[in-house]
Image (cartoon, rainbow, N blue to C red):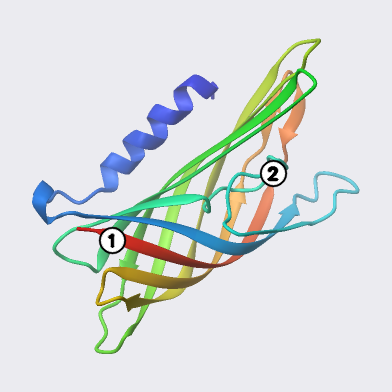
Amino acid sequence: MKTRFAVPVVLLALLAVIPAAPAAAVECGLGADLGFNLFIPSSDYEGAENISTFGWPMGGSFLGALPTFGGLRVSFRGEKPAHEVWLGTSLSFLSSEGDSFHQLGLTANYQYNFPTQGTILPYVTAGAGLNMVGINPDEGDSHSATAAVFGGGVGIARAVADGAGRLRAEVRFDQVTEGESDGSVMIPKGGNLGIRLGFDLWLK
């Protein structure tokens, strides 16, 4: 998939899962995550080793292969708070002596919050998106690749500040497809286990 088509595809996927609700009834939340990722490359790559990363907050990865469910999180919920959708975004850019590297991650996700009588709210979530990386050397040809990312997880949340904020703890597993450029692998395929703590601030 060409990089220029990636952003519209993910945005359309997000719009497809946002519940139909009056604009006044929809709340928007902004959040971020602290987390640990363990990327397990496919056995197709001889000698490839696991990659561990930790971030506060989590965001784009210069390793390129890691899924980007961290970074800035934008959530939406309507009159029924059990149903929620959120967009995970991340962006990294590195430049040195004329060479540059960029990474962009976009994912659309659905989250179901189980109704409870207490302050702790369990939930399940699942989503899919795209991870895009590019290298622009000072000399030579530029290269870019796009890989799909999809998976899900379970977590618990607790409302704080009279419901204006929320704390989250989540365990998630995602599958990453391979991304190539001119026959060379830029994003290896594999699985990613993520453990993250996060917060959201609801904008009413």
Residue 111: image location, x then y, percent:
35, 62
Q: Answer with left or right where residue 76 lies relative to residue 71.
A: left
Q: Quadrant of the C terminus?
A: bottom left
Residue at figure coordinates x 81%, y 10% from the top left: 139
Residue at figure coordinates x 80%, y 10% from the top left: 140
| 141 shown above or below 58 | above
In the structure shown, which secondary structural element does the residue marked by tag 2 occupy?
loop
Q: Quadrant of residue 137?
A: top right
Residue 40: image location, x then y, percent:
74, 56
Q: Answer with left or right where residue 114 lies relative to residue 156.
A: left
The residue lying furthest to the bottom in this view is: 118
Mark 2: which amino acid? Lys
> Mark 2 Cα within 10 Å, few/some/many (few <14, many 20+)?
many
Q: Quadrant of the N terminus?
A: top right
Residue at figure coordinates x 91%, y 48% from the top left: 47
The residue lying furthest to the right in this view is: 47
On the question of residue 131 being in view, the answer is no
Residue 118: image location, x then y, percent:
29, 89
Mark 1: which amino acid? Trp
Residue topped by disc 1: 202
Q: Nearer the viewer, mark 2 or mark 1?
A: 1
The mark found on residue 189 in the picture is 2
In the structure shown, which secondary structural element does the residue marked by tag 1 occupy?
strand
